[in-house]
Image (cartoon, rainbow, N blue to C red):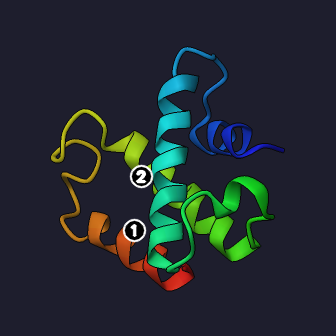
Amino acid sequence: MSLLETIKTSLHIEHGEDDELLQGFISAAINYAEAYQHIPAGTYATEVIPQVTEAAIIMLAVHFYKIRHSTDGYYADSIGAGKHVWDMVKYLL
């Protein structure tokens, strides 16, 4: 299953209207992972992404999608939830 399909399944999205947006979030998450891991940009375009890194990429892309409209929407009832996502992404990477 592709990253896009995995993320759409995680978000319970069955339509294709947000595919371009999601692909942008996936690219941003991959770029973040490569930078955080101090590996050359584009490495994961040609090499297999390790499972733990893929989990971080999925988590981050889902996070980007959920907060896309405002910073006080999805995590409004839990101020620390957004920070927890970033902490977990960093731990996985």
Secondary structure state at the residue bearing disc 2: helix
Q: Residues within 10 Å of mark 2 (few under 14, many from 20)?
A: some
Relative to residue 91, is residue 10 depicted above or below? above
Secondary structure state at the residue bearing disc 1: helix
Is tag 1's residue or tag 2's residue first in the polypeptide sequence?
A: 2
Q: For residue 8, what is the image quadrant?
A: top right
Please state which amino acid type lies under the numbered disc 2: His
Please state which amino acid type lies under the numbered disc 1: Val
Percent x, y for residue 76? Answer: 18, 51
The answer to whether marks 1 and 2 mark residues whose Cβ atoms lie closer than 8 Å is yes
Q: Residue furthest right?
A: 1
In the foreground, 18 or 30: 30
Q: Residue at x 31, y 44 (%)?
A: 67
Percent x, y for residue 83? Answer: 28, 71
Relative to residue 73, is residue 91 depicted above or below? below
Q: Which mark is residue 32?
A: none
For the image, the number of numbered tags is: 2
Relative to residue 68, is residue 53 depicted above or below? below
Percent x, y for residue 52? Answer: 68, 76
Q: Quadrant of the N terminus?
A: top right
Percent x, y for residue 14? Answer: 67, 22
Residue under label 2, please give it.
63
Q: For residue 17, what is the image quadrant?
A: top right
In the foreground, 25 or 12: 25
Q: Residue at x 62, y 34 (%)?
A: 12
Residue under label 1, please give it.
85
